[in-house]
Image (cartoon, rainbow, N blue to C red):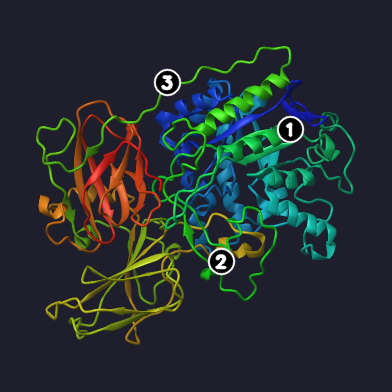
Amino acid sequence: MADSTPLSFRDGEFVLKGKPLRLFSGAIHYFRIVPEYWQDRLEKARACGLNTVETYVPWNLHEPRPGHFNNEGILDLRKFIKIASDLGLYVIFRPGPYICSEWEFGGLPSWLLSDQNMRVRSNYPGYQRAVERYFSWLLPQVKDLQSTNGGPIIAVQVENEYGSFSFDPSHVIWLRDLLWRSGVTELLVTSDNESCAKGLRRRLEKPAEASSGARSDVDLFNIPGVLPTANGMTADMLRAVFTEIRREREGTQVQDAAESNKEGNQEEGLKIKQSSRPLMVMELWAGWFDFWEAPKHVTTPARLLEETVRYAFSEGSSINLYMFHGGTNFGFMNGALQLTADGALDALGNDEMISTTAVDVDSYPFKPDVTSYDYDAPLTEDGCITGKYWAVRRLILEEKGKLNQDAQVALPSFPSGNHRAEFPLVVISWDAGSNDSSDETLERLGWNEMLSFVTKRVEEKEDPRWMELYVFPDGEIQSYGYIVYRRELDSAINFSPDRKTNLTYTGRVKDKGNILINGKSNAQVDWSAKDASVTLTGTGSTSTAKPPSLDIIVENLGRVNYTSSDNQARLNTQRKGLNGPVTLDGAPLKGWEILALDFEGGFLDRALQSDAWIKLDQSSVDGQTEKSSGPALYRGTVYLAREPADYFVRLEGWHKGVLFVNGFNLGRYWEKGPTRTLYLPAPLLKMGINQVVIFEEESEGGQIVLGIEPQLG
């Protein structure tokens, strides 16, 4: 820390401009909330008694292509921070580059994986160069928003939960130095959970277990110039981390932090007696997240949250509620987990490390997160208050009273209400008298027709390869959505109803595949089977006028965002699609057309202009006639005669796919749940006609209802 840094600490307390400060913070991620609601969520945080807000920064959204940056709309970070500042909130800035956060690839851009030797979260030169370029764009945008320059940013985090990934601090030290060189002058912090604390303690007790190449004079709880903080859900979890933060280590200098700053040596600035460090819970887990195909929505009792907050306060700790408000994993931004069969993270801090030597880690359960990031937080996905909100508010008020014995403590007034609609609507309606409805039926654009509007396509002369290894003519590398491997088959192959053909692929499908013959779904595969052979059944057509076509559609369901120290390489293998030979009845299939169905680059706009859309009648939607099968686009409209409000879209009878409203990708839906609705914020709607587009992977469904309550499962 430099001497001019406003936030320092002394005798176990934070000090801001010479006065003691307890941080009451909450996590609110700007990129999970439409910008029109940033003010509302931040006002509710302030009314809960918070004096600070914390946010991550998603590298993958801000740099979607190498050297191409975006900070507009939902990514206008400066605007978000300035709103917080105007409300009198301090800001904890967590730029990554890795953020975890149940976010796609932990916020890392997947184009990193086009380098087949890539080692993320390390000092691998290719990774370092990419991080340096990103930080050289990002950090100048917030330099003037630091508290040393009169702004609200009072702390900056270095990486994220690195101790769950590696015990070697060299990468964290490199990032620390990069932040300093880039003009960061605020207090630097790290955050780690119980598994790191216990794992590190074992290593300190058994030095022979330490990995070669690690610096022996520092560890992850004793990096000069960086304050360690804790993550956890329970008092026991926090206690384990607090113990390591306070534990005296060899070589530490017994001196005051402020006095150390005067020496002007940033690396020596926090080489101080551990007992003088303030405690901070950077992530006090207020709830938890959901996976697709889970039996139900995960909730945690308010009582547990109260107990953990009370424990933190009893230790004199500052807190950051993670999440205070979760928001939504819009589009394809949900992450995933793939841990041991018993689930290391499900155990919430199990300290038993399971060796993965000679184990096929791809066989571990793959659990992609749902679109909703409600998190069972104090504020719901759409910003409504919960019982947890009032519980936290009461505890903060009590604690502020203790810290201000001679002063009357008051909290700001609570912002008015919520934005939920009063009445549900349907996208398809045959009631011409309805004020809010549509008098149009659904329309369908078939698979082959919709693919004609995909512009990202290349030829593959050999076997299929991973999504990230293809560079399209415009220089782009596909990151999200679906990759299509397409080819014509030998005209001699007869897919008659009484014939069965075996298709065999190499390795594993990453993550879910749909196999089409002549544009019709024939079989489905997923990550769970390795080197599998799939039986393709007859299509009912024996025509030889045109050679049969084969499409293998593979969906990226979300890249892993967290892995443990016993399996660091997991993050470097997050490539999607197929990779290796494909055979049909033993005959190799060489030569493919590769199409990136990522719904970017104006794809929907072009498809909506097509004259090949076919109207569906009411009997089809009502299930009275046979519905079309196979992947396709569907579109309909809903008319709003009044000011828009928040809805929760329910797709009745639909199976799996992606939903767009007025061109905005709301995210994935899946009949397997547990989530049954997609949050639709009012700012994405308008008075008059609103267009709804569905990409359905399997077969035509029923009505699309704009409901007024979430169904999280």
Image location of residue 111, percent across then percent down: 48, 57
One can see residue 183 in this view: no
Image location of residue 526, percent across then percent down: 40, 68
Please state which amino acid type lies under the numbered disc 1. Ser
Please state which amino acid type lies under the numbered disc 3. Ser
Report, in whole angstroms, how far the alpha carbon at label 1 lies from the one at label 3. Answer: 33 Å
Report, in whole angstroms, how far the alpha carbon at label 3 lies from the one at label 2. Answer: 46 Å
Whether label 2 touches label 1, CB < 8 Å? no
Q: Which residue sits at x=23%, y=64%?
A: 630
Dot 2, crowdedness within 10 Å: few (<14), some or many (≥20)? Answer: few
Dot 1, crowdedness within 10 Å: few (<14), some or many (≥20)? Answer: few
Disc sitting over residue 314 in the figure:
1
Report, in whole angstroms, how far the alpha carbon at label 2 lies from the one at label 1. Answer: 37 Å
Q: Secondary structure at mark 3?
A: loop
Residue pointed to by mark 2: 341
Residue pointed to by mark 3: 416
Tell me which numbered mark, 2 or 1, is placed earlier along the sequence: 1
Q: Which residue sits at x=46%, y=21%?
A: 415
Left or right: 306, with 418 as reference point: right
Q: Quadrant of residue 391?
A: top right
Q: Secondary structure at mark 1?
A: helix
Can you say whether 466 is above or below 402 in the image? below
